[in-house]
Amino acid sequence: MLKKTDETYFEGEKESEKPTAVIIGAGFGGLSAAMVLCEKGYHVRVFDRLQTVGGRGSSKTQDGHRFDLGPTILTLPKNFEELWKRCGEDLNKHIKIEKLNPYYDLRFDDNNVVSISGNKSEFEDQIKKFAPNDLKGYRQFMRLSERQYNFAFSKKGSMGRSPMHRLWDTLKVLPRFALLRADRSVYKSAASYVTNSKLRFALSFHPLFVGGNPFTVTSMWGLVNYLEHKFGVYYIHGGAQAMANKMAEKIRSSGGQIKLNTTVEKILTKENSAIGIQLGSGEKISADYIVSNADLQNTYNSLLGHRKKKRWTKNKLDSKKWSMSLFVWHFGTSKTGSKWKNVGHHTILVGPNYKKEVNDIFIKGTLPQEMSLYVHRPSVTDKTCAPKGDDTFYVLACVPNLSFKNDIDWQKIEKSYKEKVLNVLERRLLPGLGRSIKTEYIMTPLDFKERYLSHFGSGFSLEPQMFQSAWFRPHNRSEELDNLFLVGAGTHPGPGLPGVLASAEILDDILPEVKNSAEEKAYSTKKNIVQV
């Protein structure tokens, strides 16, 4: 059935007594936004081009092994708990979340290991052994980390959980930024308190897991140290995909709709407002509000490619600093469940020349000669991700994104680079690994570009530098169009699961409440709609 408006047709439309919100993308930003808006009284429709919900948090099952393609570390589970609570549910009745101990091991090139856990005294005992002169400085750094967390993210209304689309909102917090030495990089901040290179790494590497260069991103990312020690590091049983699936179930049970395998081709506009979407099939769907969880480049340059931009032009986006990309090797091993007993859930193998490695990746755009690796072994915690007695692994190497003019041809070097990663793993962590691998799946920057439409194949959207944060980052309330909103890693407050969930939480502040049926009916009277 076609619904006639002044200038075009919208297919499959039903009159609704609720305001309608269309959400582009079923990643964690889009799913969180859908849950928030369903609870606020909106009629919600979610569209995603992939075959499953979760976006970068989706998974792939192969030969009995579940490969988690996205987030493998969960911090601040309370953000998910708060989201479910506002929807009238107890998260823990829907999914199992387990606190890890230790959180992760840092393995350095000299074979020394530093274990990170929530036990403050145990960690300080380690410091007394390898950096006794830095104990006082470490405690001072952790007090700074606590102040940074309390300022930026501790509660609703904190800077990272509040809208920043007005310049004044950022300007008024600059004095606090100065007091917290946000002008320093997180590495320089750590180095100002401690002298030992291993401890400096332990206190400053975290931005790499959200796409940032620790030697250039703001020291505010030091707050992750307090966050981890205070609240812990967790694992979602069933992987991030299990959480995404439960969120989708909740959206549907709340009256929302989710349509997968469906490409959104265009955001439809009238004058200066977003008024709907057009699918790849040609179908047009009207909406009072559009929420985009798509990559920034895709939102502004593709979905709105037919419109002239005021701020986020293609050249402006291209000139921004984008996060590095990733080489991710997923593999399953046979009969290794009782092998490699010293290898836990999370291990970080630190390369011998960490600073040069980071500089090669972020500044020069070249592959470093020596690499650091993050190794995820979920099968030691979750037996559902591998057949009995087997293991599932995820090994990640940071690599340059595709913006650099270099001679890296991933189609040609994928296998040789995997062999290089294998050599490091066998030498430093998993002896005899090559003989045990039975199945594998590899993702390169080309896959991030194709699967997620990620600009330059970046792993985490815009790099979270100081002048690409808060007001300087693309706003949750779009600067380009009325009724268009952004969620996800590319908008405020930034990448990482806590940031992505916060971007959806912010919608609660900037989208109107649906209070009564009379107000709902006012929304159902559609405006005259034309496609620009």
Image (cartoon, rainbow, N blue to C red):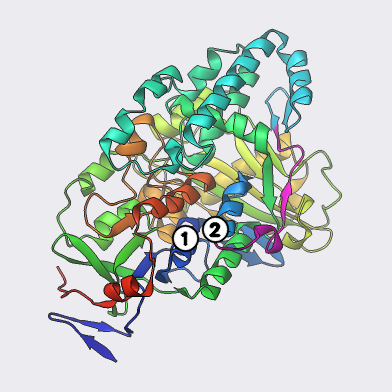
Magenta stretch?
86-105
- Separation of disc 1 and disc 2 at Cα? 8 Å
334 or 213, nearer to the observer:
213
Looking at the rendered structure, which numbered label has been put on residue 36? Answer: 1
N-terminal of the pair, mark 1 or mark 2, is 1
507 or 119, nearer to the observer:
507
Image quarter where the N terminus lies is bottom left
Pointer 1 and pointer 2: residues touching (CB < 8 Å)?
A: yes
Q: Residues within 10 Å of mark 2 (few under 14, many from 20)?
A: few
In the rendered image, which residue does mark 2 sit on? 86
- Identify the amino acid type marked 2: Arg
Q: On the picture, is 391 further left or further right than 318?
A: right
Looking at the rendered structure, which numbered label has been put on residue 192? Answer: none
| Residue 7 drawn above or below residue 426 | below
Q: Name which residue lies at 42% across and 43% down.
A: 408
On the question of residue 259 being in view, the answer is no
